[in-house]
């Protein structure tokens, strides 16, 4: 079902910076990760991706190489180095969901929609001051997240939480009475060829609905920061053990 | 379920010019439409749309304002004026499907996928010479159409079959023994604010699979022409009777 | 896309009797229909269907002949005869949606799920006292209706609102400036070969969520009656004009 | 995302016995499993499931507790004991897909449809001589498997390949340069409370389409045996290591 890495990704991102209760965020950090210099900093990230393996074969089948994603990122540190932790992620295709588990990222299946910037016609916003871009996540027939960004200006500075390594946890499920695989291990994703477009930034709104599950609800926004709309590319090569 | 027109549309199009058996094409033309100067000229059109009503309210709900579409266009004439006839169309959302029937366009529900040009990263083609863009249609779990365009150059000249009015047939289904509505009537879509991006043009491939139904199979390509990739916007206001 | 009637239907039904504000119900009755002897009587009906045309050809393609449905029924009368009016209906397939519009029933597309009685194993309820059966409707990623029935006894008496004719309104959309088809007309569905299984009846619960649209919210339950679980078959032949 | 076992299952099964090239089947058997007494014996199994955890909480959410499945079973032996090997499986929900990987079963995501026996009306077959029941699998918009069973008689004898333990392989993906988990291990599913309904048996048809992937195509039928339609329940507790 899965090809071996490296995997290439090209995506369109709608992202909202926000703040959660630092104590709630801390409960999602495993041993080895610390809240760091900015506890409670978080981001809600919608992305529309294309992906392919090294031989780029998947690109000729557009129903196979595309998927939508929503994830929450929490600011953290490992041995003093800024990183991000992803406590929740949803994608709308099976292959990226399985690939998430392989890399220690707890991806679930959901329905993700996101505005597309337009360049002609009136049915959408242009990437220009005043343009509005929305994202929405539904899980099992219920609305779970809604985000909206109205862009005002463009910069070259990537959003902080989209510009640090992700620290995941490799988990091996226990199935037999003689145990599963080894104990959980912290791992950082190994990424190259990172490429950002101009970053369009402006005001934002974010709703995290409370009826999915109790733990998810603790990550509701205390304060909403700026929103960002941009294109992003990277190549994912594998993982590097942070601790053993 | 449906808002009143006008409806605005902004879309990304992957389109292949091709030729069908002129006699097969003629069988899809109702009384009043003639094969015209170029009998057998046809196009296979994939499009990814955003749409909205006059107040643009739908744009804040990206799962509502987006849909994918595939349609076949056949060259024809009405009283000497070049037009296009759409014998088959599929969309992946209910609202545009119903809206199709209201305007006399026989839209069905299918699964439509189409490559998205990228500007960063390696998972996709840029809109530049050598870029490849694919489309695929599946209906009830079977692959029905595959198209591929490799763009080579850009122009300002819209593809011929995407630049003429569409001639549909308003049909009122018969449900009671006392009959349905009036007899079928030819109608032309009333469109304004047409906007094209640069048109990227190049070589193309097109497969029309034979196992959907016999009539659809008669529209398989005898010859494959150029392919086009472009953005397109329009506003649809209603219909104008061609004959009564 | 549609075969001509007659169409055969075999379904599994989970249904809840309830009461709405009689004034709210009256606003959904067109001229010609009266509230009747029991104003405010309503039902919420989940059904899992198989259907086929006269030659039964669709039955060999299970993805084509199956669909789920949810509808609201309101008690009413036409010239003193008890009937039911359906102000809202959702199905999860395109063919029954279009067929609804042909017969004057305003069907939309939604996601419908409904418990299946089991006869072996522990993952479900048997059709026996204490068995619980649920239904759920989501529309555009939001939960809209939830129903639950716990059956206590079985009878041969069909639920009142499932045993009267449906009065629909044939509507011909206006598309050209010269008007659409004729004015709306009241029509009753012509049904034969009605067959009920034993009716399992018991206590019920029903939630109608308020955030779909204002009009739908006015049909929320003031009082919840009994619930019913049963199998039902019929053949639908066409419509009969109630008024012209 | 996953609750701990035990998990209860209640399902409706449409199954076709058939024979594959014994050499092709052997290529799907890992070290430790032997072709056994009946090399080349295989089965194609469609099932419509409900499932729940020990507290049965999922049953109140019918969109969560239901899924469809298709799998291929190959006859084999472990240390002389008859077992079945599953080289391919597809389900239409994310939770059973992930649960498959946890137990060493390579489940992918597909679209599965299967006839439902009816007890009233004309839109389907009754479980009685002459009744026909179909299954269909599509993967990424392409038809992959079609099966059909026409039942003739009922028995109490379960189909051979549905009445032996399944031997899966626990695999721990390698993600970091320091390796993944331990090497793959053979494991048998631990099942209790197995319950069969009467087994309806008759003639069958089976098509395995060749365009999914080369390896899958090697499991196409050389000979088609009988088909079976029945209900089945079990409780799955975990896995037992066959070898270490």
Image (spheres, coloured by chain):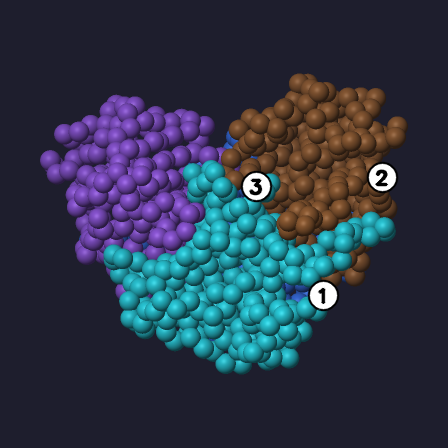
Chain colours: A blue, B brown, C cyan, D purple
> How many other residues sit within 10 Å of disc 2, few (<14), some (14-19) or many (≥20)?
some
Is the same chain shared between marks 1 and 2?
no
> How many other residues sit within 10 Å of disc 3, few (<14), some (14-19) or many (≥20)?
few
On screen, residue B170 above or below B20: below
Answer whether labels 1 and 2 touch (C-beta < 8 Å).
no
Q: Residue at x 67, y 74 (%)?
A: C27
x, y (%) of residue D47? 34, 46
Q: Residue at x 49, y 41 (%)?
A: C54
Nearer to me, A31 or A65: A65
Is the same chain shared between marks 3 and 2?
no
SS for dot 2: loop
Q: How much space separates mark 3 and mark 1, taking CA atoms? A: 52 Å
Q: Taking C112 as reference, is B152 left or right?
A: right
Chain that bears disc 3: C
> How many other residues sit within 10 Å of disc 1, few (<14), some (14-19) or many (≥20)?
some
Per the image, the residue denoted by label 2 is B242
x, y (%) of residue C23? 64, 79
On screen, residue A95 above or below C164: above
Per the image, the residue denoted by label 1 is A203
Q: Nearer the viewer, mark 1 or mark 2?
A: 2
Q: Quadrant of residue D205?
A: top left
Q: How much space separates mark 3 and mark 2, taking CA atoms? A: 28 Å
Q: Nearer the viewer, mark 3 or mark 2?
A: 3
Which label was assigned to residue C78?
none
Q: Taking D168 as reference, is B185 left or right?
A: right
Q: Nearer the viewer, mark 3 or mark 1?
A: 3
Q: Quadrant of residue D129?
A: top left
Q: Residue at x 25, y 54 (%)?
A: D233
Nearer to me, C116 or B63: C116
SS for dot 3: loop
x, y (%) of residue A43? 58, 62
Which label was assigned to residue C3?
3
């Amino acid at each position: 079902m899965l090809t071996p890495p490296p995997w290439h990704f090209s995506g369109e991102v709608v992202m909202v910076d926000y703040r959660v209760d630092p104590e709630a965020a801390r409960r999602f950090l495993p041993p080895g990760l610390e809240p760091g210099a900015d506890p409670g900093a978080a981001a809600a990230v919608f992305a529309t991706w294309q992906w392919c393996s090294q031989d780029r074969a998947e690109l000729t089948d557009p129903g196979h190489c595309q998927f939508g994603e929503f994830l929450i990122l929490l600011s953290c540190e490992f041995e003093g180095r800024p990183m991000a932790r992803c406590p929740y992620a949803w994608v709308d295709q099976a292959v990226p969901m399985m690939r998430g588990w392989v890399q220690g990222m707890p991806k679930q299946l959901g329905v993700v929609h996101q505005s597309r910037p337009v360049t002609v016609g009136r049915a959408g916003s242009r990437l220009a001051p005043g343009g509005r871009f929305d994202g929405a996540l539904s899980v099992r027939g219920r609305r779970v997240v809604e985000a909206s960004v109205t862009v005002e200006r463009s910069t070259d500075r990537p959003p902080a939480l989209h510009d640090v390594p992700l620290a995941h946890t490799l988990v091996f499920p226990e199935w037999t009475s003689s145990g599963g695989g080894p104990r959980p291990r912290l791992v950082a994703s190994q990424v190259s060829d990172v490429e950002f477009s101009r970053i369009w930034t402006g005001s934002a709104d974010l709703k995290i609905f409370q009826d999915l599950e109790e733990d998810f609800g603790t990550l509701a926004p205390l304060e909403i920061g700026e929103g960002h709309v941009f294109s992003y590319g990277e190549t994912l090569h594998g993982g590097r053990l942070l601790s053993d």
